[in-house]
Structures are given as C-alpha cells and as structure tokens.
Amino acid sequence: MYPDNNMPNTCGDACGTMPECAPLAVPYVPFQQTNPKRYSQQDALNNGTLFPGLNLPFRVKPDAAKVMGGALAELQALEFVLVELGLYLDTHQGDAEAFELYKQYAAMEKEAREKYEAMNGPVTQMATANAKTWAAWLSEPWPWNYQEGGMK
C-alpha cells in the first residue's frame, strides 16, 4: 500500500511523477570534427544547421525560399550560415579554411543586405540610421507581408 496520496515514495526506471522522477530529455551532442562537410547556404537554412553531421531533423521544415521570397530568403540563408560558422569557429578556432569561408560569407551577406535594403528598405532598426527618416523603418511591406507568389 502507498501513503495517503496513493503514489510510491521512490521512482523506478521510466515511471514517476513530474518533475522529481520523470526524465525530460536525454541530450546528445555529436562531436564535430575539424573541417566537416557543409550544406549550401539555402540547404543549411532549410535543415537548421550548416553541417550535415549535426542535422537531427525533428520536425517538418519549410522551404524558406518559398515562404519569404528569393532575395530575403537568400539574405537570411547567408546570415544563418555566418552564425553557424561563428559557432563552429568558437570551438575550432584553428580552422583557417573555415575562417576564410566566414570572411567570404560575411562579404556576401554585406553585399546582399545592401542590395536588398536599396530595393526594399531597412531590414533592421539599426539600418535605419542610414535612412533619411525613421519612417523608412515603418514603411510596408514587412517581410511577413509576403506570400508564396507575391504580396498579400
């Protein structure tokens, strides 16, 4: 017989009440080798990682280019790859090839952002500092106003 709450005092494997006894997650982080294979920037964005060895798909992933439109999806993919390479370089700072790739992607992102902002307005509030008025930041269309095949 259990105490008054009808629950056992100790938890066995894979049973118990939350949160004391129930395992919530068993984390696994793959070890990343130096100079690993890399996805293209759009595939990286679609897979949620630049590195195929870290690709652990847990959900259905949208095709970002179809959701946001070509130029904005390209810019987001470049920014995503820069974040991924930056995280990789945090743990592999001696990988000169990855650092050169980071610099190449940084230049590509800068060019793509400047081109996008020239055509569509600022992407971030900080970019508004280069505009003539704050209204440039508030003008439509916002990125979420796009639908597949054009504007709403």
Image (spheres, rainbow, N blue to C red):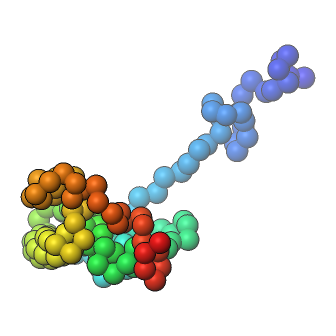
In this view, 148 is above or below 138: below
Q: Residue at x 33, y 81 (%)?
A: 70
Location of residue 38 (image quadrant): bottom left
Quarter of the figure that contains the N terminus: top right
User: At which x and y percent is residue 121?
Assistant: 22, 66
User: At which x and y percent is residue 110?
Assistant: 13, 70
Q: Residue at x 50, y 72 (%)?
A: 61
Front residue of 119/65: it is: 119
Q: Residue at x 71, y 33 (%)?
A: 17
Query: Going by the image, does 77 lie left or right of 98?
Result: right
User: At which x and y percent is residue 145?
Assistant: 42, 66
Front residue of 71/45: it is: 71
Front residue of 15/69: it is: 69
Q: How many marks?
A: 0
In this view, 150 is above or below 142: below
Front residue of 43/132: it is: 132
Query: Residue lying farthest top?
Result: 4
**Can residue 5 be spotted in the picture?**
yes
Q: Residue at x 65, y 39 (%)?
A: 22
**Can residue 53 be spotted in the picture?**
no
User: At which x and y percent is residue 135?
Assistant: 22, 54
Query: Going by the image, does 64 lie left or right of 58?
Result: left
Location of residue 60 (image quadrant): bottom right
Query: Residue lying farthest right?
Result: 1
